[in-house]
Image: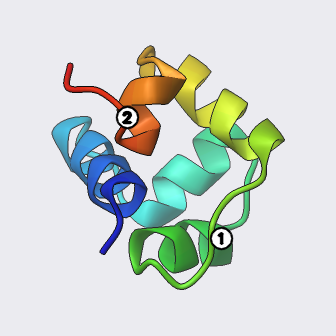
Amino acid sequence: MSKFSERLKELRIDNNLSQEQLAKAVGLSHTAIVYWENGQRVPNANAVIVLVEYFEVTTDYLLGVEKQ
């Protein structure tokens, strides 16, 4: 599992959100969240921006480039 996958799941769980709730909150598909958390696909830049703005973290943190 990639750092991105791990951190996305961790942030979602820490915020008490289901995958479906997160998808609705950020306007992305539930399927995309599932694929990303399972490491089956990677998000495009626009999706990363939406996620970092929602969770109020840096792109470096979400992508696993640095520790928060």
Does residue 48 appear left or right of residue 55 in this picture? Answer: right
Residue 24 in picture, x, y percent from top left:
64, 50
The 10 Å Cα crowd at callout 1, few under 14, some 14 to 19, many 20 or more, is some
Which element is circle 1 on?
helix
User: Most extreme residue toward the bottom, as rendered?
Assistant: 40
The amino acid beneath tag 1 is Ala
The amino acid beneath tag 2 is Val
Q: Residue at x 30, y 47 (%)?
A: 7
Does residue 43 appear left or right of residue 57 in this picture? Answer: right
- Do residues under tags 1 and 2 come within 8 Å of each other at their CB atoms? no
Residue 58 to residue 65: above or below: above
- Give the image's coloring scheme: rainbow
Residue 50 in picture, x, y percent from top left:
69, 31
Residue that badge 2 annotates = 65
Q: Nearer the viewer, residue 13 or 44?
A: 44
Residue 29 to residue 35: above or below: above
Residue that badge 1 annotates = 32
Q: Residue at x 42, y 36 (%)?
A: 62
Residue 26 in picture, x, y percent from top left:
66, 39
User: Most extreme residue toward the front, as rendered?
Assistant: 65
Which element is circle 2 on?
loop
Q: Nearer the viewer, residue 58 or 18?
A: 58
Q: Earlier in the sequence, mark 1 or mark 2?
A: 1
In the picture, which quadrant includes the N terminus?
bottom left
Does residue 36 appear left or right of residue 30 in this picture? Answer: left
Does residue 31 appear left or right of residue 62 in this picture? Answer: right
